[in-house]
Image (cartoon, coloured by chain):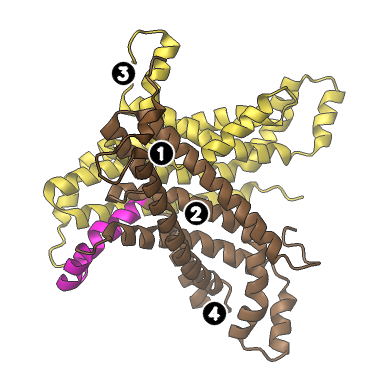
């Protein structure tokens, strides 16, 4: 069973796993979280606005994205983006989009749908009287949102946003389907090259577990600290 | 966009000899449905057991259940799938490992176990939340009329707890369906996998993925409508489960 478990394989692969793989995984997680929260907030604001058509469009985007598997969306956007680029830049040929920029855009757009739902809940958790009070003292819509509603919505939803980030961190492993060297991709390449699947996949699982578990413990502590006693 | 759309491709014969490309996608849908139903059964059984454990008076049971949930929640599904597919057969006694590797529908069984257990941690969280949402008096009343703890759970707590958590369980089932797409990495020809290979054979990328998208949306709608009907059918008059 474990008699020929070779720690040396893992040890020798460490620089590659972390410098190449984990760097990509963490970069993708960070960029998609920041981009997703910003885009998600805009979508949530559109959805809650009283503009014509746009609330329906925002809701449709969120519902469709949330009904589709991420793997399908990764493939679809990977093939779609060259054509969208061609249309946007008015070139004669479909443009070249690298797997890297493709995944960053895909994850941002996909996660925005989930963050939009979180931000919508956050915005709706602010009592309507506060919005009314804001208008009453003469603030504009933009001012009410950026000085009264959004700071509180963001603060209330911070633990949920971080929890979603942990989910996103785990989901980044799916870029494997485009043969990108993220942490799992790096582990898998070493595993195939050295014929050491047991060691590499167990090690990858342990690393993902440690990071996600520690992060979720920190989120729990954060939640206890920032919850407002009413 | 100067992409040449040709929806007729769906009715052209596919190279896998099973009929048209549309047949190929529908075959993928069949695997998606089969895998998600089987995985959901695994998730419900294990999730309920662990969820109940989390609410028992025993300190050990609570912490074992907690450890189970943390273990399955904090490792990405794809990594868990690889562990079940590549690593577990190596760790089994040699003959068993060989038998597992040569199973006819190996990818299917692996996907059912991996996705089922992965989802069971989420089901367990919901089930224990449902039990904890019931007033304390209910289990006390069960004890008072002479029921054993097992009977209290079976006849009093669980029937109400399941009704309370039916809406979140619906979305976990929808997640199970979406998660089956990860199994294309171990060679299961489910819907996303079928769309991917249709794209590779026919070069009609967008027809393949648009058709798959439409099928996923339809599946989603069918499940949502079905579960709403189930909620209505199971509702206990006078007890508002959606408090």
Marks 4 & 1, CB-CB < 8 Å contact = no
Q: Are marks 2 and 3 on the same chain?
A: yes
Residue at image x 61%, y 40%? A118
Would residue A134 be found to the left or right of residue A83 on screen? Answer: right
Start and end of the magenta stretch? B78-101
User: Residue beneath label 1, please?
Assistant: A72
Q: Hey, which residue is sitting farthest bottom in the picture?
A: B146
Q: Are marks 3 and 4 on the same chain?
A: no
Measure the C-alpha gap from mark 2 to mark 3. Answer: 42 Å
Q: Position of residue B143 (x, y in %)?
A: 69, 87
Marks 2 & 3, CB-CB < 8 Å contact = no
Q: Position of residue A166 (x, y in %)?
A: 46, 46
Q: Which chain did the renderer colour yellow?
A: A
Measure the C-alpha gap from mark 3 to mark 4. Answer: 60 Å
Residue at image x 74%, y 83%? B141
Chain ID at mark 1? A
Q: Position of residue B201 (x, y in %)?
A: 26, 34
User: Residue beneath label 3, please?
Assistant: A96
Label ID, residue B58: 4
Marks 4 & 2, CB-CB < 8 Å contact = no
Chain ID at mark 4? B
Residue B207 seen by the camera: yes
């Amino acid at each position: 069973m474990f008699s020929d478990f070779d720690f040396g394989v893992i040890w020798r692969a460490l620089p590659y796993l972390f410098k190449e793989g984990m760097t990509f995984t963490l970069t993708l997680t960070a960029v998609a979280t920041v981009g997703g929260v910003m885009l998600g907030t805009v979508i949530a604001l559109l959805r809650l606005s009283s503009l014509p058509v746009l609330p329906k469009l925002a809701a449709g985007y969120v519902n469709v994205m949330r009904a589709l598997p991420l793997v399908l969306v990764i493939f679809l956007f990977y093939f779609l983006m060259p054509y969208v680029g061609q249309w946007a830049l008015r070139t004669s040929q479909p443009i070249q989009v690298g797997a890297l920029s493709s995944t960053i855009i895909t994850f941002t757009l996909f996660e925005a749908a989930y963050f939009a739902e979180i931000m919508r809940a956050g915005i709706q958790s602010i009592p309507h009287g506060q919005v009314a009070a804001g208008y009453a003292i003469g603030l504009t819509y933009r001012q009410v949102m950026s000085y009264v509603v959004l700071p509180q919505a963001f603060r209330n939803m911070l633990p949920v946003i971080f929890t979603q980030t942990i989910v996103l961190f785990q989901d980044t492993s799916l870029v494997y389907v485009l043969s990108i060297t993220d942490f799992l991709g790096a582990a898998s390449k070493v595993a195939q090259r050295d014929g050491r699947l047991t060691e590499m996949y167990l090690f990858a699982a342990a690393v993902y577990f440690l990071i996600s578990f520690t992060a979720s413990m920190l989120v729990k502590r954060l939640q206890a600290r920032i919850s407002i006693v009413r | 966009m100067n992409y040449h759309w040709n929806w007729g491709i769906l009715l052209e014969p596919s190279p896998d000899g099973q009929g048209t490309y549309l047949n190929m996608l529908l075959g993928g849908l069949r695997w998606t449905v089969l895998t998600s139903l089987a995985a959901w059964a695994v998730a419900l059984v294990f999730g309920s057991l662990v969820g109940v454990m989390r609410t028992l008076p025993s300190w050990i049971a609570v912490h074992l259940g907690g450890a189970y949930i943390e273990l399955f929640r904090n490792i990405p599904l794809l990594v868990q799938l690889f562990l079940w597919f590549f690593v577990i057969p190596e760790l089994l006694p040699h003959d068993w490992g060989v038998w597992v590797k040569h199973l006819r529908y190996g990818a299917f069984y692996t996907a059912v176990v991996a996705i089922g257990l992965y989802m069971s941690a989420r089901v367990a969280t919901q089930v224990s939340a449902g039990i904890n949402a019931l007033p304390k008096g209910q289990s006390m009343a069960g004890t008072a009329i002479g029921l054993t703890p097992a009977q209290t759970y079976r006849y009093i707590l669980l029937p109400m707890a399941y009704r309370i958590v039916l809406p979140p369980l619906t979305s976990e089932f929808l997640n199970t369906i979406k998660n089956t797409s990860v199994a294309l990495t171990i060679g299961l020809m489910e819907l996303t996998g079928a769309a991917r290979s249709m794209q590779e054979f026919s070069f009609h990328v967008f027809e393949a993925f648009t058709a798959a998208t439409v099928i996923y949306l339809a599946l989603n709608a069918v499940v949502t409508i079905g579960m709403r009907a189930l909620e209505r059918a199971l509702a206990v008059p006078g007890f508002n489960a959606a408090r």
